[in-house]
């Protein structure tokens, strides 16, 4: 992103036909996010961080239920929110005023720093999703 290139993601980077709706509810242990919760966490994080970067959201977040990370479990809906969030980041980045001063978690920052945090957050949870996939016998597409 520092070079002006937004991150590219597929809607469900590990799914294809291997990550069934039943596996979407899988979690490695009690109290740990499930596949669907990880993906919703990424989607919600993207949208929240975009708003922190001063981007006017086009996604209708008012349609989200209370506690959406755990409330939204349907695979199609999770993927829709994930895809919407990735598309929102991709469309916002090129036009964003990256030098704009914003308040980010109570501290002054530039919008570019918030976009960098989006990238870091996505990569952190992509690693988590890869570990989940491998624990369930799903081979990430780029490893085939």
Image (cartoon, helix red, strand yellow):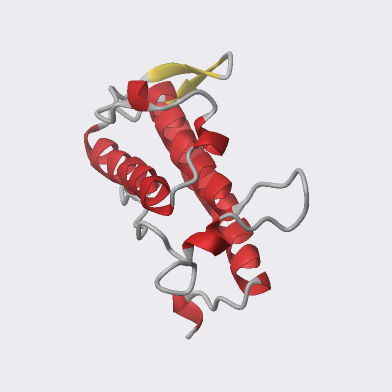
Foreground: 97 or 39? 39
Question: Height in image: 105 above or below 142?
Answer: above
Left or right of 92? Residue 66 is: right
Kindly give the residue lying farthest to the right in the view shown.
Answer: 30
Residue at horizontal 60%, vertical 51%?
124
- The quadrant where residue 22 appears: bottom right
Residue at horizontal 41%, vertical 60%?
12
Kindly give the residue lying farthest to the front in the view shown.
Answer: 22
Question: Height in image: 126 above or below 100?
Answer: below
Residue 7, horizontal then vertical, whole percent? 37, 53
Please say whether residue 116 is visible from this viewpoint. no
Foreground: 143 or 68? 68
Left or right of 4? Residue 37 is: right
Residue 130, horizontal then vertical, whole percent? 59, 66
Foreground: 73 or 102? 73
Question: Height in image: 19 above or below 88?
Answer: below
Foreground: 39 or 57? 39
Residue 74, horizontal then vertical, whole percent? 44, 48
Please say whether residue 29 is visible from this viewpoint. yes
Residue at horizontal 54%, vertical 27%?
67
Residue 133, horizontal then vertical, whole percent? 59, 68
Residue at horizontal 78%, vertical 48%?
30
Total number of numbered discs in the rendering: 0
């Amino acid at each position: 992103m520092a070079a002006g290139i937004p991150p590219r993601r597929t809607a469900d980077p590990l799914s294809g036909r291997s990550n069934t709706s039943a596996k979407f509810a899988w979690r490695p242990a009690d109290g740990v996010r499930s596949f669907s919760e990880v993906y919703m966490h990424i989607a919600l994080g993207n949208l929240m961080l975009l708003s922190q970067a001063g981007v006017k959201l086009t996604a209708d977040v008012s349609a989200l239920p209370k506690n959406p990370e755990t409330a939204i479990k349907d695979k199609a809906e999770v993927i829709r929110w994930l895809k919407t969030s990735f598309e929102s980041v991709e469309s916002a980045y090129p036009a964003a005023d990256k030098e704009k001063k914003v308040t980010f978690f109570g501290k002054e920052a530039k919008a570019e720093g918030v976009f960098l945090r989006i990238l870091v957050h996505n990569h952190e949870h992509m690693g988590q999703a890869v570990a989940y996939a491998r624990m369930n016998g799903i081979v990430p597409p780029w490893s085939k």
